[in-house]
C-alpha cells in the first residue's frame, strides 16, 4: 500500500535518497528525489569530462568521502560504500551492469 511506504520514508534523511539499487527499478514504482528549494546553494552537476576523472571504486572510498565532504560514518558514506561494492560485483549470468 502506498500509505505504508510513504510513512516509512517520513523519518528518512531525504539527502541520502539519491542512491538506489536494481531492486528499486520496477515498472510503476515511484522514487521521490528531493532537491534543495534554493538551487543557487545546491551543488552543480559536473561536466561529463570532469566526472569521468573521479576514481569511483571501493578502494578509493576515503578519497571520495573527502572529495564530496561526507564523514566516514554518515548515511551518505554508507550509501556510497554499498553502491560501490554492488557495482564492483561480477554481474550474474544474463545481467548487464551499468554503474
Image (cartoon, helix red, strand yellow):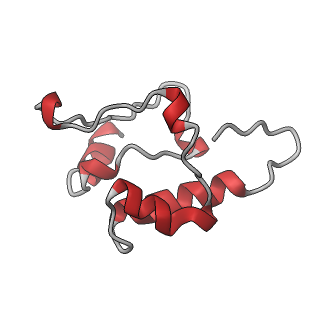
As drawn, the residue found furthest toward the bottom would be 73
Residue 57 rendering spot, x and y as whole percentages? 62, 57
- Identify which residue, 29 or 88, lies in the foreground: 88
Residue displayed at 21% across by 51% down: 10
Residue displayed at 37% across by 59% down: 76
Figure check: 19 above or below 72: above
Figure check: 25 above or below 71: above
Residue displayed at 17% across by 29% down: 39
- Identify which residue, 40 or 31, lies in the foreground: 40
**Image quadrant where one finds the N terminus:** top left
**Image quadrant where one finds the C terminus:** top right
- Identify which residue, 40 or 36, lies in the foreground: 40
Residue 94 rendering spot, x and y as whole percentages? 86, 38
Residue 55 vs residue 95: left or right? left
- Identify which residue, 58 or 10, lies in the foreground: 58
Residue 62 rendering spot, x and y as whole percentages? 48, 69
Q: Quadrant of residue 13?
A: bottom left
Figure check: 61 above or below 20: below
Figure check: 16 above or below 58: above
Amino acid at each position: 500500500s502506498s500509505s505504508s511506504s510513504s510513512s516509512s520514508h517520513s523519518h528518512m534523511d531525504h539527502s541520502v535518497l539519491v542512491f538506489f539499487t536494481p531492486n528499486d527499478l520496477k515498472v510503476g514504482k515511484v522514487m521521490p528525489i528531493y532537491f534543495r528549494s534554493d538551487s543557487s546553494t545546491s551543488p552543480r552537476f559536473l561536466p561529463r569530462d570532469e566526472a569521468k576523472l573521479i576514481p569511483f571504486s571501493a578502494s578509493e572510498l576515503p578519497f571520495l568521502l573527502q572529495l564530496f565532504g561526507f564523514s566516514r560514518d554518515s548515511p551518505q558514506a554508507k550509501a556510497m560504500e554499498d553502491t560501490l561494492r554492488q557495482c564492483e560485483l561480477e554481474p550474474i549470468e544474463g545481467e548487464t551492469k551499468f554503474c
